[in-house]
Image: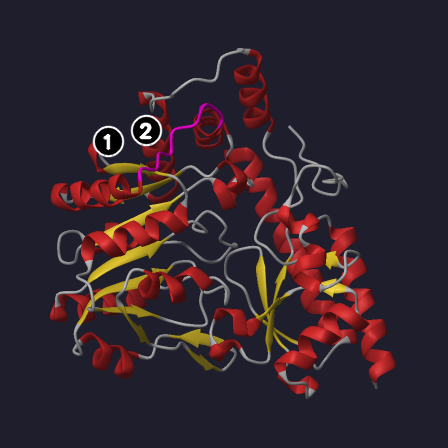
């Protein structure tokens, strides 16, 4: 089966955030939107067919989770990562961000420390604060064009009242796929200080050739308490459907997380998200393999274009995700000027790096989950703006 990722699909009239929030986000409605993390590609046909079939049934009542849904996730992680997950470990959740909050509430006492490692996905920075925990920062270090953990600072944070560490794996926005020795050392630190880990692994399927995602919980065994967040949302372009899962081995932790959700009276059950979740994990493998080949080609194209036409912008080499982390510090612009430059001069809507923490100052995040012609158009617009500026 062929997958046409070059196809331009209009998203007009679909209430899509990426396009219809351009005016409120960028101050103009005509920027090329390469910001929020969803893709402009059609979902796998199996997912679309499952949704259509469910829509043809005219009743949309309260919904339970069917066993085949659990089976599809268990089979997916076993096939892709040789990780044997048991049925009872799975807690279905109404999205990844709510599950991060619920995990903090369940595993970390109020006023205790939560370690996050910026620049990082924005909810990591506000979830500890909104749940009345202490935000502990362990900024990543950029060494030779590649981000690394700061082990010395991590040790200090771990010994200063921290009870939880939030890991982004693969890392959004810097694109790191953590190596086994890095994850082992992270677990060693957490074991020494009795720190639990919430590992956000929703980008785990989006890893480029030559790298391998390793589930932290598989590596941890029973040495460290690990809660793993997974979802088909990023992999198969389903974020609007919301359904995600936490993989939680410890029964008491599962109960505490369920209680946290109960206090909010929220449910993840939805007839459409359920059928999409199952169909994606059951039949989406060939589509994903084709997507990764396409994204790798786009990544290579962006790298070559920057080197040839925009040398002041450096690509931090991505090992995973469809999000590129662009080092724009040589352009000589402050963060306000940088945002204005891309929006007003280039007409391209990117995420300012400072949204991911002050360590992102001078950087921009670019979403390449669009047809290659769109990415080419954006690069050419930036190059024209740069020629005019110089």
Picture layout, residue 286 above or below residue 249: above
Say whether residue 212 is left or right of residue 264: right
State the mark number for residue 87.
Answer: 1
- Read off the magenta span: 265-272
Give me the residue at 16% from left, 46% from top.
253
Give me the residue at 57% from left, 55% from top.
322
Picture layout, residue 143 above or below residue 77: below
Say whether residue 321 is left or right of residue 212: right
Q: How many marks?
A: 2
- Residue 117 appears in the figure: yes
268 in magenta: yes
Where is residue 9 shown, x and y percent of the image?
74, 38
The quarter of the picture where residue 328 lies is bottom right
- Residue 180 appears in the figure: no
What predominant SS class does the magenta segment belong to?
A: loop
Give me the residue at 79% from left, 65% from top.
347
Picture layout, residue 232 above or below residue 53: below
Where is residue 177 shown, x and y percent of the image?
43, 61
């Amino acid at each position: 089966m062929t997958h046409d990722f070059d196809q331009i699909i209009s998203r007009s009239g679909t209430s899509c955030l990426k396009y219809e929030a351009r005016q409120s986000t960028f101050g103009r409605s005509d920027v090329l939107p390469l910001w929020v993390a969803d893709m402009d590609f059609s979902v796998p046909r199996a997912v679309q067919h499952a949704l259509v079939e469910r829509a043809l049934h005219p009743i949309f009542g309260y919904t339970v989770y069917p066993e085949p849904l659990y089976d599809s996730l268990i089979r997916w992680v076993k096939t892709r990562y040789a990780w044997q997950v048991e049925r009872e470990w799975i807690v279905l959740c109404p999205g990844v961000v709510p599950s991060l909050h619920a995990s903090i509430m369940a595993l970390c006492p109020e006023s205790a420390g939560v370690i996050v490692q910026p620049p990082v996905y924005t909810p990591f920075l506000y979830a500890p604060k909104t749940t009345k925990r202490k935000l502990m920062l362990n900024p990543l270090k950029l060494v030779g064009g590649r981000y690394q953990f700061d082990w010395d600072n991590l040790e200090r944070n771990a010994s200063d009242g921290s009870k939880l560490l939030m890991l982004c794996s693969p890392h959004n926005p810097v694109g790191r796929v953590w190596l086994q020795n890095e994850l082992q050392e992270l677990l060693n630190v957490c074991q020494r200080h009795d720190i639990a880990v919430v590992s956000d692994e929703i980008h785990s399927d989006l890893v480029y050739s030559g790298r391998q995602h390793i589930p932290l919980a598989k590596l941890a065994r029973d040495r460290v308490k690990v809660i793993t967040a997974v979802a088909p949302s990023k992999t198969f372009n389903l974020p609007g459907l919301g359904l995600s899962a936490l993989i939680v081995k410890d029964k008491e932790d599962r109960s505490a997380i369920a209680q946290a959700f109960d206090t909010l009276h929220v449910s993840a059950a939805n007839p459409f998200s359920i059928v999409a979740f199952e169909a994606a994990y059951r039949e989406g493998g060939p589509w994903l393999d084709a997507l990764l080949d396409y994204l790798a080609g786009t990544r290579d194209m962006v790298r070559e274009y920057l080197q040839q036409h925009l040398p002041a912008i450096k690509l931090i080499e991505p090992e995973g995700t469809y999000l590129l982390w662009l080092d724009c510090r040589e352009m000589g612009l402050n963060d306000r000027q940088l945002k204005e430059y891309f929006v007003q001069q280039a007409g391209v809507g990117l995420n300012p790096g400072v949204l991911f923490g002050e360590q992102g100052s001078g950087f921009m995040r670019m979403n390449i989950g669009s047809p290659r012609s769109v990415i080419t158009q954006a690069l050419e617009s930036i190059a024209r703006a740069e020629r005019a500026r110089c």
